[in-house]
Each structure stands twice: as structure tokens, then as C-alpha cells.
Image (cartoon, rainbow, N blue to C red):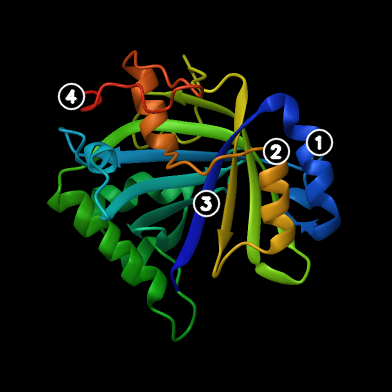
Amino acid sequence: MARLEYKYLVPTNLLSDLRDMVWPHVEEDHYSAIRPQHEYTVRSLYLDTSRLSFYHEKLAGLRERKKLRIRGYNECGPDALAFLEIKRKTGMAVVKYRTPVLHQNLLPLFASGDVGRYVPALPGQEEPRDNARRFLFHYHRLALHPSVLVTYEREAFLFKLDHRLRITFDKNVRVQNQVALNSLYKETQVRYPLPNHFILEIKTNSGCPSWLKLIISRFDLNQEALSKYVICTDSCHGIRYDPEQPNERPLNGFRL
């Protein structure tokens, strides 16, 4: 089912006040609640073509576009998972196809293409394997390769009256562009493209409730077409994102 996404860039010094105002309406999601700091680390290894086609599709503002990434969480371990994700966007609506794979099986899967061996499937459910085949199809057809690794800490909340409304604070965004398929849990030579800001994301199946609209208005936040992938790719190539003038950037972005 397609979901709507709304994104806002927020100064870090407003984090505590914003959290306090949101808190009466929400509860922590399970993955935040079980972590010592009530946040978890998100790691996204983005794939793109040699000409950065996905990056330029976003800059061009195409209504229909997609991106592929490999996502992991927190620290690496023997049971750590990597998720193959295809994210399709049509306007504000987003559909995600997602497949879990043991991180230790990631390279063998890409080398062999043996979905039946490396992708678990519940009895009678072929969707994870179908999603993996779809991912590998695009990976080989478009000759994709790892582009950048984007990492951040996330606080995640669910609306108490409707868990389909999800609110996240994505903090300490950082990036590296010397990456490979096995780089998901490695951090070296990182850059920080948003040193004084975090990203507020709202995901919902409908619109925002009135209490949330009021909070957004009170903090004078503006909805933006924020893309961590674009901002971080720009940062790796010397294009700085200016929160005060988000539209003042090279129109064509970075080109190889």
C-alpha cells in the first residue's frame, strides 16, 4: 500500500522542545524503546548507475522515480540482517519492496543470484523472494554499483491512536563514498552534510492530524523535498546544502 511522506529540516537546538510537544500524542516504536539511548542507527548503502541516473531523476523532479538501496541497522553481528529495498515514488506516495537477507549472505547472493538458497521464505509466501528477484533484476539490468553509504541515528514514534502514522527524527546524518557491497557496517572518512540540523519525517496513509499540523506551524517548519541521498552525494562532491537557501544550488547537480 502506498504511503505519504512529509519531510522537514529542523535546527538541532529545537530537538528537545519538538520532542516534548510530540510526546503526549505518541509512543516509541519497538526498535527505539529497546535501545539504551532510545534511538537506533540506520545504515543505507545506495546503488546507482555509472551516470548517477537515480540522483539526476530526483534533481529533475520526475513524478515517478525509484531508488535501490541496501539497509542495515545498529551493529554488525552473526545474525545481522541486510534489507534489499526498492523505493518507488509517485508524487508524495511511496511504495517500498523489501527483502531481508543475512548480512553474511549478501555477497554470495549477489555473486550467485541464488534467491532460493539465500532468501528465507515463510511457508506459502513467496513475496520476499519475488522482491529479491526484482531487486537483482534491476541491479544487473542497469549495471548498478554502490554509490554512497548514508548513516544516521533515528528516534521513531507511533501515533497512539493510529500506528499507521509514524514520526521519526533522523539525526547526525553522515556519509562516505568509498564503498562496496560489503561496506554496510563500515564507517571511514565520513562527512557531515547537515551538522546543525536533523530531518523530521512523517509517514502516513492519509494526512496529518490537527495536533501535528499545529506543532509544525508553531515551530515554523516548511515541508521540503529532502533527499538524504542527494544531499549526501552532493556533499561528497563539494556541493554544500544551505538550509537557509535550499534552492541555491547548481541546477544539474554533480555530473561525472
The alpha-carbon separation of the residues under discs 4 and 3 comes to: 28 Å
Q: Marks 1 and 2: CB-CB under 8 Å? A: yes
User: Relative to the observer, which residue lies in front, 79 or 255?
Assistant: 255
Tell which circle, 4 or 1, labels the residue nearer the N-terminal end: 1
Question: In the displayed structure, would residue 246 be above or below residue 72?
Answer: above
Question: Can residue 79 be seen in this snapshot?
Answer: no
State the residue position of label 2. 219
- Residue under label 1: 17
**Residue type highlighted by circle 1:** Asp
Task: Check disc 1 and report its element: helix, strand or loop.
Answer: helix
Gap in angstroms between the C-alphas marked 1 and 2: 9 Å
> Which labelled disc corresponds to residue 255?
4
Q: For the point 15% across and 48% down, which residue is it? A: 142
Please tell me which residue is depicted at 17% across the width and 50% down the height of the picture: 140
- Marks 4 and 1, how far apart at CA: 40 Å
Name the secondary structure under disc 3: strand
Q: Amino acid at mark 3?
A: Tyr
| Image quarter in which the N terminus is found | bottom left
Q: Does label 4 or label 3 sit earlier along the sequence? A: 3
Quadrant into which the C terminus falls: top left
Which residue in the protein does label 3 denote? 6
Q: Earlier in the sequence, mark 3 or mark 2?
A: 3
Question: Which marked residue is nearer to the observer: mark 3 or mark 2?
Answer: 2
